[in-house]
Amino acid sequence: MTDRPLKIAIVVGEHSGDQLGFKLMQALRAQAGRPVVFKGTAGPAMTREGMASLFPLDDIAVMGFAAVIGRFPTIYRRAWQVIDAIVADPPDGMVIIDSPDFTHAVAKRVRRRLPHLPIVNYVSPSVWAWRPGRAVSMRAYVDHVLALLPFEPEAYRRLNGPPCSYVGHPLMERLDELRPNAEEEAIRQGARPLLLVLPGSRSSEVGLLTEDFGRTIELLSARSGPFDAVLPTVPRHAERLRQVTASWATKPRIITDADEKYAAFRRARAALAASGTVTLELALAQVPMIGTYRFPAWEAFLARRLVKGRFFLLPNLILDRPAVPELFQEEVVPDRLAGLMAGLLGDTDERRAQMQAFSEIDQRMQVVGETPSQRAARIVLETIAAKAR
């Protein structure tokens, strides 16, 4: 075994990737059998693990078509900064994490200049939902895909993409934070239910959904009687949401702290949610929900023509059936939402069916013997070793 440090480049494009990245760094150090040196792009968590980022992650961590266009000159310049830094001092392997518009652009150009460098993609782009041709094209610059969702390896086989392994979703490492203890379960089943209201974390989602969610709350209160409501959000939206919800029939408590959010998940009877990772959090927390998705009109027009999947909620994608009601665009009608939600607050067949579906999701997402980060690190090291032979 060589004493030379193992050099690994990690490229992330936003803060969710930073959270995966720091756990991967810890697991790589634990398994490598020698010192590991990291380089690339990093957020605060990866920086605390000892990786100096080539530039602040906020330079490229933008969402939405308009935001990307507005920041394109900076993103383009930063991409080439990463490429040049990696090529100038070639690592033993490279891991790109999520943010495919940025990280895949980097990987393609690094592969052209370092054709034998092992490259692993951590978090699959949604090739199973739209632009499926990406799977085939990834074979040219990705040696292995690490998937967070259990159905993704089969999608890559079907689409003739690179090898893909399910490593497990990082939320599976947080089940203790999501699941209620006996006291919290008693609150969940109590006479006055707690409803989670989750209008999304992006500004566009918040603006498009809060009015309908407020009207839904009003109708639900009239139909089902009194309940409490909690609205978890990110700090930048908190004041805006306090103002918007001040006139709601049941005024929700606005929270921004992650520990408070999970405490609310453990006590909640049901949830009204925008589509996103939060719907998987709710499923793992065993909170029945209604899922919604609303775009600006022009984005909805494109989505209807480009997105190929039958479902858009993560629980339904994992199960490949509509276990959770999902309402898209003009289907997001307060009267309909209130009717569906009333069925989840009571002891109903609809509620029991969702709870049974969540148990099935648990079974499908289990990773035995390793945490998701440990399995991801093992495959990264195996990929590097295989290409070194």
Image: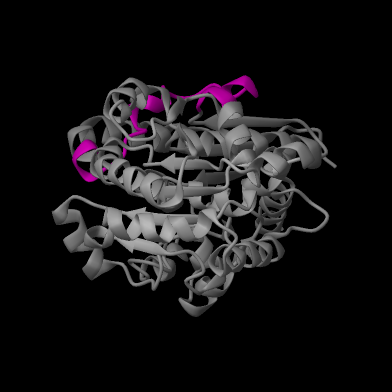
User: Which residue is at the front of the view, 88 or 15?
Assistant: 15
The range drawn in magenta is 43-67
* Color theme of the render: one colour
User: Which residue is at the front of the view, 84 or 135?
Assistant: 135
User: As drawn, which residue projects farthest toward the left?
Assistant: 298
Any part of residue 266 in sight: yes
Residue 29 placement (x, y as % from top left):
75, 35
Any part of residue 125 in sight: no
User: Which residue is at the front of the view, 101 or 244?
Assistant: 244
* Residue at 49% across, 67% down: 317
Residue 319 placement (x, y as % from top left):
56, 70
Q: Is residue 69 above or below residue 49?
A: below
* Residue at 56% across, 74% down: 154
Q: Is residue 233 above or below residue 273?
A: above
Q: On the rendered structure, is 329 left or right of 99? A: left
Q: How many numbered badges does the structure rendering display?
A: 0
Residue 311 placement (x, y as % from top left):
41, 68
User: Which residue is at the front of the view, 381 or 362?
Assistant: 362
Q: On the rendered structure, is 54 left or right of 236? A: right
* Residue at 45% across, 45% down: 225
* Residue at 58% across, 42% down: 268
Q: Quadrant of residue 45?
A: top right
Q: Is 206 included in the stretch rendered in magenta?
A: no
Image quadrant holding the N terminus, namely top right
Q: On the rendered structure, is 42 left or right of 55? A: right
